[in-house]
Amino acid sequence: MSIQGDTESLIKEAELYRTQGLLTESRERYLKARKSLAENQFSDQKSLKDTVEKGIRAMENDMAEINMATDTPELSEDEQDLIMGLFSFSQTKEAAKIEGAVALAKFGQYKQALNEFHRLLDQGILPVTAAKNIIRCHLSLSLPEEAVSQFGQWISGGLLTKSELRFIRTFLEDLFKKNGISKKLPHVGPLSESEELEEEERRALDISSVVIQLDNSGCKESQVEFDVTFQEDNVISFVVSADKRYLLDAFSQGKRLSHMQFYSPMAVFKGIGIVCERKEIRVGPRRGDYVLDIKIAGD
C-alpha cells in the first residue's frame, strides 16, 4: 500500500475507534495521520488534512466531556452567553471576545472555551493570547500530550509567526516545569535578529503572577499572591476566591496599589497598579468568587 493509502487507512481506523469510544486508540491514529501529512505530499492533501483536524477536534471534545463529567457541572448555552457577556470588559471587540472565552475557562467550561479560542485563533484575533489559553485549557483537562500535539500543529501551520511560536514554546515549557510534566517539545528553528528582539520583548511583558503589599487594609495578611489568569497589554486579571472575600476592601474599584511585584519568565519587577474592574461570579462552579482587573501603571 502507498504512503497515501496508509494515511487514509489510519484516518478510517481513527474514526472507527472514536465511534466505539476508544479515544486513546483514536488519538494515536489521528496523530500518526497528521505526522504523515506533514512529512509527505499527497493528492487531495487539503481534504485529508481537514478530515484529520476535524476528527482530532471532535475526539478532544469527547475526551473533555469525559474528564469534566464528574468535576464541573455543564452550563446551559444561556449561562455561557451570560458569563461571556459579564466578563468582557474591554472596549475593543477583539479583546472582549478573548475575555469572554477566558471567562468560560475560569468557570471550568474548558470544552466550550477551547472551541472559542480555536475560532478566534483561526480568525487571527489576538493569536498569542488565544494560543496560550488553548494550552492552558489542555493542561486544565490533564491532557499535556494534546498541548504538545497542538504546538506541533502550529509549527507546521501558518497561524503564528516564528517569534510567536518561540514565545509559546517557552510559555509551554514553563507550565510543564511548574506542573512537574516532562514532555519533549518540537523546536521552532532560528530567528532573525528582529524576531529575537520581538520574542524577548513579549516574554518580558508576559506576567504569570503578582505579589501585592496590602497597605493599611485591615486584613490579616500583609501581602497576597495571585496567579494571573489573563493579560491584555498592561491589564492583568486574577480571581479572588470566595473564602478570601475579606480581601475585597483592599481592591475597591479605582484603588491605587502602590506596592506590587510582577513575575514574568524574563524578570521580576516592581510597579503600581490601579483596580479598574471588580465583578462577582454569580453562576457556575465558581459562584461567589470575584474577578479583578488591574491596570499596570509603572513605578
Image (cartoon, helix red, strand yellow):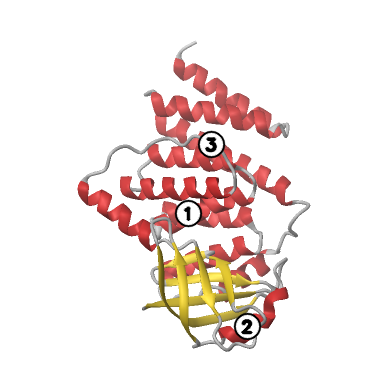
Q: Which mark is residue 248?
A: 2
Decide if residue 44 is in sight here: no
Instruction: Give the structural element (helix, strand or loop) at label 2.
Output: helix
Instruction: Give the structural element (helix, strand or loop) at label 3.
Output: loop
| Residue placed under numbered mark 1 in the picture | 132
Please tell me which of labels 3 and 1 falls first in the chain.
1
Residue farthest toward the top in the current orientation of the protein:
1
Please tell me which of labels 2 and 1 falls first in the chain.
1
Answer whether labels 2 and 1 touch (C-beta < 8 Å): no
Residue under the image location 26 percent in, 49 percent down:
195
Task: Locate the C terminus by quadrant.
Answer: bottom left
Residue under the image location 51 percent in, 17 percent down:
6
Q: Nearer the viewer, residue 58 or 151?
A: 151
Instruction: Give the structural element (helix, strand or loop) at label 1.
Output: helix
| Category of crowding for the residue at label 3, using alpha-carbon neighbours closer than 10 angstroms: few (below 14), some (14–19), many (at least 20) | few
The x, y position of residue 97, in whole percent, is: 48, 66
- Identity, as a three-letter code, of the amino acid under mark 2: Leu
- Identity, as a three-letter code, of the amino acid under mark 1: Lys
Query: Marks 2 and 3, Cα distance to the nearest angstrom?
Result: 39 Å
* Vertical side of 211 occupied by 214: above or below: below
| Residue placed under numbered mark 3 in the picture | 183
The x, y position of residue 76, in whole percent, is: 70, 64
